[in-house]
Amino acid sequence: MIITHDLALGGLQQVIVNICKTINRELFEPQVLCLRATGDYTPEIENLGIKVTLVPQKKKGADYFAFLKVAKILREERINVIHTHNTQPFIDGTMGGLLAGVKTMVHTDHARDFPDKRRYMFAEWFLSHFVRRVVAVSEHTAQNLVKYEKISPRKITVIPNGIDGSKYAISIDKDKKRGELGITKKGPIIGVGVRLCEQKGITYLLKAMPDIIKSFPDCTLIIAGRGPLEPELKAEAKSLGIMDNVRFLGMRLDIPELLQIMDCYVLPSLWEGMPMVLLEAMAAGCPIVATNVGGISSVITPEETGSLVEPEDSKAISNAVMRALKDADLRNRITGNGLASFAEKFDSSVMTRQYETFYRT
């Protein structure tokens, strides 16, 4: 039983989908349990013949006894292994698993901004004693779990997130796609697809655009995603005088196609775990510029699989983007190395095989 908050569009949820797709069905019969809601990925999982269950919801307020409902479901389904993802599933899933007598429990921490709330960190430290493994999605996340939650390093394993690369290694009519998006400029396309929130640092990418536009007047920045900062970022783009070169696309379900028209993918985050969007860009053969925060350096090797810059540095972003757009040899080396690195380390089947070793313990 894979236990999650929900199956909404997101990196954590994408990991769950990919485990469901690549798990050895001769050895395992997977199910998914959602604590708060189902979501957009539910049909994709159910189409694999995998049962998705939503814990009965309380009408009002926090459900402090959800773990009892989880335990009941685990007993009814005769679950042998549970795999929880992030804090609430860790708490309710592990407590439910203990009550239901589940012997093998694995937890994945998908990274967050530490220090977290003290009660959460204490709960995770306590529950870590009852699971087989606490999996961190990057070395940086592992270090935070030891530093802030005092989880034993012997209990922690690093397994990088993985995605289905075949979804991104596609060929499309790029001119047609530009036309669909209303992009009339013929120059290079810079892109990013993330939730529009403080963490992602989009403001620093916008501030980098005036310098980029001076060298590439016909360039276009496409921003896919929604979030609380969307109105503020649109206002900032207008105040910078760059709206003619920027398109806010809103939430998109065609990210693989968007990546195919990007000449450079930029992730200007202020903090991260191991962002799935970089794996997507890598699998699509898109040159990457990203900030050197969190677990990003475990994905990007400077000058080999992308470019790393310091966070909150718009000038460094503009310089790195312009270099990538001007230097064809650099772009070709980065994309070629990126595709090779992805196949070796970040394909979803590589991730799932590692998880399976703990499921079988």
Image (cartoon, rainbow, N blue to C red):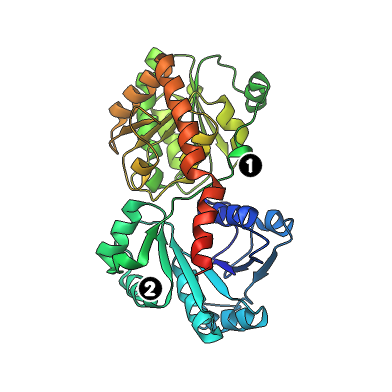
Pinpoint residue 79: horizontal percent, then vertical percent: 61, 76
Which quadrant of the structure image shows residue 109?
Answer: bottom left
- The answer to whether one can see residue 237 in this image is yes
Query: Considering depth in this image, is 48 or 254 the residue closer to the camera?
Result: 48
Where's residue 304, x and y in %?
37, 28
Q: Secondary structure at mark 1?
A: loop
Label 2 sits on a secondary structure element that is: helix
The residue closer to the viewer here, 271 or 338, is 338
- Rendered residue at 53%/68% (across/down): 360
Q: Amino acid at mark 2?
A: Ser
> 62 or 65: which is nearer to us?
65
User: How dense is the environment of label 1, judged by Cα within 10 Å: few (below 14), some, or many (20 and up)?
Assistant: few
Residue 206 vs residue 100: left or right?
left
- Residue drawn at (56%, 52%) of the image: 14
List x then y, in percent, for residue 37.
61, 65
Identified by mark 1, the residue type is Leu
Q: Which mark is residue 253?
A: 1
x, y percentage for residue 105? 49, 72
Circle nearer the viewer, 2 or 1: 2
* Distance from the alpha carbon under mark 2 to that under mark 1: 36 Å
Q: Tell me: residue 223, above or below residue 18.
A: above
Please tell me whether residue 121 is drawn above or below residue 99 in the rendered image: above
Considering only order in the chain, which callout, 1 or 2, is on the residue closer to the N terminus? 2
Using residue 356 as the reference point, say whether residue 31 is left or right of it.
right
| Vertical order, 125 against 229 (above or below) | below
Q: Estimate how packed mark 2 is, as few (under 14), some (14 to 19) or many (20 or more) residues with alpha carbons within 10 Å.
A: many
Label disc, if present, on residue 128 of the rendered structure: 2
Query: Residue at horizontal 44%, vertical 50%?
Result: 160
